[in-house]
Amino acid sequence: MFSSPQATIFRQWVTWAAAATLLVWMAIVWVHFAGIIIRFYSPLPFYDYWDTVGHIDRYRQLDFGVLWQQHSEHRLVFPEIIFAADYIFFRGREILPLVLSALFYFATWLILSAVLYRSKLPLIGRLCSILLAGIVMGWEGGALLIAAPFLIQWSLMLAAAALVKKHPRATDAQIREAFAGLKCRCGSHMSILRAVKRLTEVA
């Protein structure tokens, strides 16, 4: 058996070895993730965003009045602007939506990492939690969010990040107010509010 100092050193070595293993695992997962995005990339709009094709001529004339039209029972102005810019600058190849979706997806992990790093866990526990979150987010099914962009979730995530920054212990009323203008017909609004509430509890 190890003596007490030797046992401590051994535990530390095993712990940091586990963290290094998680780091390598996350790198492999994300490389695979990027490969899936490249393979399944499509220049075609996704779901509701087929409507943007009908607006191409107005975008090219810099007529942005189309942004004030009702769309799918809710206004998706931010994604519409991204598609408009892609039509104007990249001839509708979905390059800008793809790049921004990838950046926002990575930023989501960074925001989650910042929340986890501020937790009361020991340093190694925080680092392992961050790496595990990165591994989970690198799940290949998540590549569909990026390879076929550009959906409403980025507006929701940005709103959540802004809320947690402004009110780390936000009340239910503050959460409802922050998301009052971001309702989606998918029916997941209450689940989103519960997830944000949980985020404020662990932040």
Image: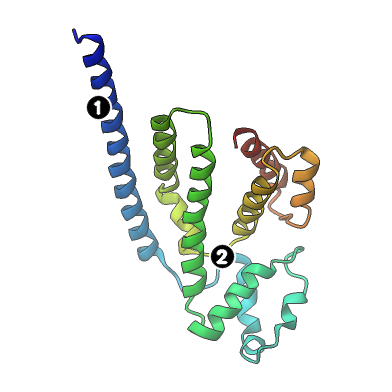
Q: How many marks?
A: 2
Q: Position of residue 12 (x, y in %)?
A: 28, 25
Q: Mark 1 or mark 2: which comes first in sequence?
A: 1
Q: Farthest left residue?
A: 1
Q: Name the disc covering residue 109, or none.
A: none
Residue 19 left/right relative to 119 = left
Determine which residue is flagged by label 2. Answer: 150
Horizontal and vertical percent position of residue 125 = 42, 30
* Neighbours of disc 1 within 10 Å: few (<14), some (14-19), many (20+): few
Observer-nearest residue: 38 or 157? 157
Quadrant in the picture for residue 196: top right
Against 10, residue 200 (above or below) is below
Residue 60: image location, x then y, percent: 61, 90
Residue type at numbered disc 2? Phe
Q: Which residue occupies 41% across, 38% down?
A: 132
Q: Residue at x 73, y 56 (%)?
A: 182
Asked if labels 2 and 1 touch by Cβ distance under 8 angstroms, the answer is no
Residue at (46, 74) in percent of width and height: 95
The residue at which mark 1 appears reads as 13
Asked if residue 203 lies left or right of residue 145, the reply is: right
